[in-house]
Amino acid sequence: MSFQFGNNLSVAWKKLKGGDYTVRTFEANKLWRFETVTSSIYHHAKYGMNLYRALYPENHKYFGNVANLSSSLYERVFTTQSIDPKLLWYYLDHNFYTEYENNKNPLDITDDNTVTYLWQSSSIMALPMGMFGEGIKEGSFTVTNHYQYSGSVGGTGSSQTAWEYKLIDDGHGNLIDTVFDESNFVPNQYNLLYIGFNEKYREFNYKNNKLDYVMDSSPYKNNVDIINPRLITYQTGIPTSPQTQSSGVSANFNGSYLYVKNKDRFNFNSGSDFAFSFWINIPPTQSNLTNNFNSLFDKKTTNSSVVNGEDLVTTSIVENLYPFDITISNSNEMISGSIHFKQKSEVQLVEVSSSALTSSIWHHVVCQKTGSEYQIWLDGMLNASASLSISDRVRNNSEFYIADNGTGENYFSGSLDEIRVYNKGLSSNEILHLSDNHITASYAYQTNRVGNIFYEKGMVVVSDPRPKYANALLGNTGNFDHSQITNGFEGQFRSTKTIHEHEIICKIRKNEFNFTQNPSVLNDNLENSSIIDKYVTNPFFNPYITTVGLYNEDRELVAVAKMGTPLEKRDDVDMNIVVRFDM
């Protein structure tokens, strides 16, 4: 099947062999123009997806038009659209496919049965499988967006083709954008923790009753709680370059903090390499000035112990040793806004301090230990380093907190986003791409997957939080403002069709059908044309079967089976003829 949309065109479908379709285009004003729609709520039983469905009143089996459910990050107002009623573009507010679970195998490939949350908005194309086959064949879907951005890309005179993308279906339920070079990603098996806050879009406008969880999207699905959830707010995420747009969701802390319950996974020993990658935006001054530093990532202050085998007791105590401690200095220090990265054994301490961060501006930070080197990278560049070989133990029993030290007395004020912890040191190329949130090819999200495809249901979802995909398939601004094919798209897929083979046994008894109605057996004498020739009455005469008819209960002929070669009808034994046909 092929399809395209642009220049205010609609499409008509013509079926070809093998489940393929081709497309003919018509001007939308001359065909399939509908001014009104009725609406209903449709529940996707298998995947738990609640969709807003627009149904044409003229024909309920056609799915079409665009439904907009006021996204909290993007808002599009649609009135009437002149589009093909057999295709459906949903503009969907934040929904998710299945319930979040913690028991996912880290090595499983993401497919349409695993947990995948939608982001700030999504464009959904529905291909009604009753019309175009039973499903979409795995690995056959592609769509190319011919997108012309209304401004310049990357400054002056940049190519508009930078906004184009080609999405392919990887055969496992993922939509992959081929623009990305996967060798620039940090391999996912090294990712111990990934908190991007993109599941918190629904809480943008919540005043109270914040939910006390965030999702860890790493392969390990760590349990993370929010302490003091009413003191956290969610805002637009990290900025893109070079334009001043934003992508995803970030968290603003001011008395709240995160508790990562799987503390032992992050209890690095003195010989282990590790890296903390995160984006940070600090205010001009910290709200909490109890100490000289505010905690960003702490594993040295609070520990827990079990008393009498039952009661969990939390104790606030500064450990003499810790695998990491990352803080930011406040106005009590001479240099405010400096990142401090430390590791300590009972006899050795190493500390690296960065230059001061500019307030009210997003920065990308990497604090890492690689070999004997302790480094701080700012915005893709090495900013500070120190060298020391610690041979003693640095592991401890302390809890792991983000944006505080677990006491509520050293909390950080400011925004964090795209938090990742790796159990390896990162290369300069990996750090450079982690800090790259370019508007046309962002590597900051470390994925080339931009959506999902549901093969059986014919649902194609583009749900990536990056601005490049915000209006996927919806035109230049999301209002179907296609201008010829430059703001349209085209694609293709193969459909599936199950063919059932049927077999019917026709039994002919030896005393049945021992005659023929072939007119050639009649006498050639014109006066006796109704008299059967003598050879037919011979006891050795046997007719030949060439055709078998299949009848329904009303004795109506519904099918005819032709024999490959004539079959002699015997009158001394019963015979069986097997008729096979596909439907």
Image (cartoon, grey):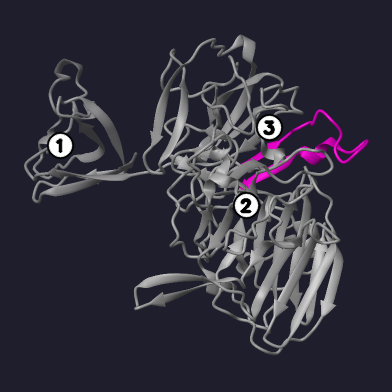
- For numbered disc 3, what is the local secondary structure? strand
Residue 559: quarter of image: top left
Nearer-N-terminus badge (3/1): 3
Side (left or right) of 544 relative to 25: left
Name the one closer to the observer, 477 or 566: 477
Q: Which of the numbered marks, if any, corresponds to residue 196?
A: 2
Q: Looking at numbered disc 3 in the image, what kind of residue is underneath it?
A: Phe
Side (left or right) of 404 relative to 327: left
- For numbered disc 2, what is the local secondary structure? loop
Nearer-N-terminus badge (3/2): 2
Q: Looking at numbered disc 1 in the image, what kind of residue is underneath it?
A: Tyr
Farthest residue toward the left? 511
Q: Quadrant of the C terminus?
A: top left
Q: Residue at point 50% right, 33% down?
A: 127
Side (left or right) of 61 relative to 274: left
* x, y percent for residue 367: 75, 67
The residue singled out by tag 1 in the image is 535
Q: Looking at numbered disc 2 in the image, what kind of residue is underneath it?
A: Gly
Q: Residues within 10 Å of mark 3 (few under 14, many from 20)?
A: many
Using the rendered image of the protein, determine whether residue 183 is visible from the camera's viewpoint: no
Nearer-N-terminus badge (1/2): 2
Q: Residue at point 68% right, 70% down?
A: 325
Please report contact status of discs 3 and 2: CB closer than 8 Å, yes or no: no
The residue singled out by tag 3 in the image is 489
